[in-house]
């Protein structure tokens, strides 16, 4: 079974000073990850970006897994980013199918004995991450968009509108509905059946995002 | 500190991060921070840090992971206060 999870962090909404305090970031990144940042990344990325990059990757892993384990507890300190490949250039993309490996941060995360692969886009405005259980992201559809409100109801409606621009092309002539499971994850249905697509939504402040993969 | 006193103080901790201000007055043990109070998950660590400062306690990783609804937040804070 394939899967995906995604997360977005609006960089203008984070508290930079607090993010740089060890009392804060130690709840998100492990000592090993902090050492990795100090040695390999501190010259090219501010600490707060690394902290929130780690958060978005780990939250994406949680969303990937939570669909199959509804009672799973999000434990960022128990997830460890073991590798992070820095891209040659910055990305200007806000969506598509798969990722340009020259412009995204590619990560390898371990949690509960399993490996996950992450692809993250960092711009001046946001950090977006999507997670997969293989390093082949060609089946992952994704998009990021800025919206005019940070109200949860508007975020929810807008992310559904955003994905509705793509899904009908893959499921033509079907009356698609996006619903929420009792455990909080979204799924797509038509008539009385759930469609073979795994969807993940994310929002933070004025930014919304989705990732999805066909589950054939 | 009783559970009710902790609950009343917790409302002040949650207030800056919830957009569902009307619900804050009526929260109970089952109130979910994300689904009911509409707190963005990115603010959960802020809540833990603010609770640590307000109650002068240290919340370890395992306890922090449990703080997903009001009841579990009160449980963690109550236990930490009694360990002091």
Image (spheres, rainbow, N blue to C red):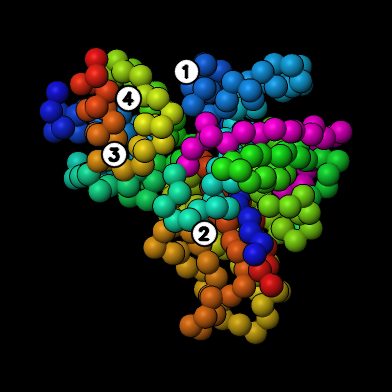
Is residue A206 in sight in this rendering? Answer: no
- According to the picture, the residue beneath numbered tag 1 turns out to be A23
Does the magenta run of residues contain B53? Answer: no
* Residue A84 image-quadrant placement: top right
- According to the picture, the residue beneath numbered tag 4 turns out to be B51
- According to the picture, the residue beneath numbered tag 2 turns out to be A68
* Residue sitting farthest toward the front: A113
Question: Which of B30/A206 is in front?
Answer: B30
Percent of width and height locating residue A3:
63, 59
- According to the picture, the residue beneath numbered tag 3 turns out to be B72
Does the magenta run of residues contain A84? Answer: yes
Could you tell which of marks 3 and 4 lies nearer the N-terminus?
4
Q: SS class of the residue under badge 4?
A: helix
* Residue A40 image-quadrant placement: top right
Q: Residue at x 57, y 36 (%)?
A: A79
Magenta stretch bounds: A74-95
Q: Nearer the viewer, mark 2 or mark 3?
A: 2
Mark pair 2, 3: CA separation: 23 Å
Quadrant in which the N terminus of chain A appears: bottom right
Tags 4 and 2 touching, CB below 8 Å? no
């Amino acid at each position: 079974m394939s899967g995906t999870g995604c997360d977005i962090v609006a960089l203008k909404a984070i508290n930079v000073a607090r993010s740089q305090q060890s009392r804060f970031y130690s709840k998100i990144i492990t000592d090993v990850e902090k050492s990795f940042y100090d040695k390999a990344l501190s010259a090219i990325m501010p600490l707060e970006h690394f902290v929130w990059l780690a958060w978005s990757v780990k939250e994406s892993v949680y969303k990937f897994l939570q669909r199959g384990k509804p009672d799973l507890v999000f434990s960022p300190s128990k997830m460890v980013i073991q590798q992070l490949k820095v891209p040659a250039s910055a990305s200007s993309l806000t969506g598509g199918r798969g990722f340009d490996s020259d412009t995204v941060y590619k990560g390898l995360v371990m949690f509960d004995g399993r490996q996950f692969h992450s692809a993250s886009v960092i711009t001046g405005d946001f950090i977006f991450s999507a997670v997969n259980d293989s390093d082949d992201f060609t089946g992952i559809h994704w998009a990021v968009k800025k919206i005019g409100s940070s109200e949860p109801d508007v975020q929810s409606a807008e992310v559904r509108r955003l994905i509705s621009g793509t899904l009908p092309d893959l499921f033509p002539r079907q009356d698609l509905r996006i619903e929420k499971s009792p455990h909080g994850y979204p799924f797509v249905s038509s008539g009385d059946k759930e469609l073979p697509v795994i969807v993940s939504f994310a929002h933070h402040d004025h930014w919304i995002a989705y990732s999805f993969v066909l589950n054939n | 500190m009783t559970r009710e006193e902790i609950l009343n103080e917790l409302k002040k901790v949650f207030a800056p991060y919830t957009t569902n201000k009307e619900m804050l007055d009526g929260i109970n043990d089952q109130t979910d921070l994300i689904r009911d109070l509409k707190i963005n998950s990115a603010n959960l660590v802020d809540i833990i840090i603010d609770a640590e400062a307000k109650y002068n306690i240290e919340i370890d990783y395992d306890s922090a992971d449990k703080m997903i609804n009001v009841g579990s937040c009160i449980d963690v804070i109550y236990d930490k206060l009694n360990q002091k």
